[in-house]
Image (cartoon, rainbow, N blue to C red):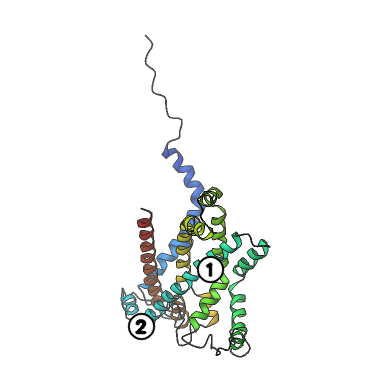
Amino acid sequence: MSSPQAAPRSAAPTARRLFAPGLLFALPFLVLFALFLLWPLAQGLWMSLTDTSLSAHAPGFVGLDNFTEALRDADMWRSLGNTAWFTVLSTVPLVLVALGLALLVHTGLPGQWVWRLAFFAPYLLPVGVVSLLWIWLYQPDLGLANHLLDTLGLGQLAWLGDESVAMWAVVLTTLWWTVGFNFLLCLAALQSVPDQLYEAAALDGAGAWRRLWSVTLPQLSRITVVITVLQVLASLKVFDQVYLLTKGGPNGSTRPVVEYVYDVGFTGYRLGYASAISYIFFALVLIASAAQYAALRRREK
């Protein structure tokens, strides 16, 4: 009798044999990740527990005093409120306008490349150019915005000098500048909708509006959620255009929390306190992100 054959060894490499080559390939990324992300995070956390300053004195450990002071800081809470208000005001139009523009282009307007270029080109401009352009448009006497209001018989506005208007001016600038990216995502999603769905709806007698509500919008639900999440995170980090347009004014009505951190750290020289505010804001962003993720998972189920 022939001896029983041994069980054939698996041809696939074991996880242990793959670990070392995989780690070697990932090592450059891990080094850069640790050097430029993990180490600054750890350094900033330690700094938030000290009274580090740009002055000459040596920093001392203060524990949670910076966090306690920040939680009692009315200016910090006002800047957080400005950030939340800007996020609400900007996210909604940046999603809806992008969807509307994509639908217009997708319907087959003549000269499609012109429309795509016109909608996306502002997104390619640097923030300095965008801010300077809109500062000219918002000029009280010579700006195009007030000229249009005069033409319509409406009163002029101090676009960047009125507390009740300045935030809306920043939102309008941000909408013009960044809507092109969301437009591109929506247009790509529209082009991936199967034509068979529209053909089946047309055979069932569905008109253009019914096809929009029953076919197009449901097919865009996933990309709409993605755009909304990305836009919320981007709006929470707003700084550049606000600083260049209004420097947080008038009277702090547009100052976001990132600018407040900048003012405290590099104008007030209190780096330890600025770090504490940054970590409070970081925790709030994590909570908001977790809430969004939980809501999306619940919707999918």
Question: Viewer-proximal residue, 6 or 80?
Answer: 80
Q: Which residue is the site of mark 2? A: 74
Look at the image and tell me whether residue 58 can be seen. no
On screen, residue 281 above or below 226: below
Foreground mark, 2 or 1, reads 1
What SS does tag 1 mark? helix
300 over 141 or under it: above or below: above
The answer to whether mark 2 and mark 1 are in CB contact below 8 A is no
Tell me which numbered mark, 2 or 1, is placed earlier along the sequence: 2
Foreground residue among 206 and 18: 206
- The picture places residue 273, in percent across and down from the top left corner, at 38, 77
Counting from the top left corner in percent of width and height, residue 217 is at 48, 59
- Residue kind at label 1, given as amino acid type: Val
Q: Can residue 288 be seen by looking at this rendering?
A: yes
Residue 43, how many percent across, how many down? 41, 67
Q: Is residue 83 left or right of residue 64?
A: right
Tell me if mark 1 has few (under 14), some (14-19) or many (20+) residues whose alpha carbon lies within 10 angstroms of its own.
Answer: some
Residue at 39% x, 71% y is 281
**Residue lying at 38% horizontally and 66% vertically, measured from the top left:** 288
- What numbered label is drawn on residue 97? 1
The image quadrant of residue 50 is bottom left
Dot 2 crowding, Cα within 10 Å, few <14, some 14–19, many 20+: few
- Residue 79: percent from the left, percent from the top? 41, 79
**Secondary structure category for the residue under label 2:** helix
Residue that protrudes farthest toward the top in the picture: 1
Kind of residue sitting beneath label 2: Ala
Residue appearing at x 56%, y 62% in the figure: 103
Q: In front: 148, or 210?
A: 210
Instruction: For marks 2 and 1, give the CA distance.
Output: 35 Å
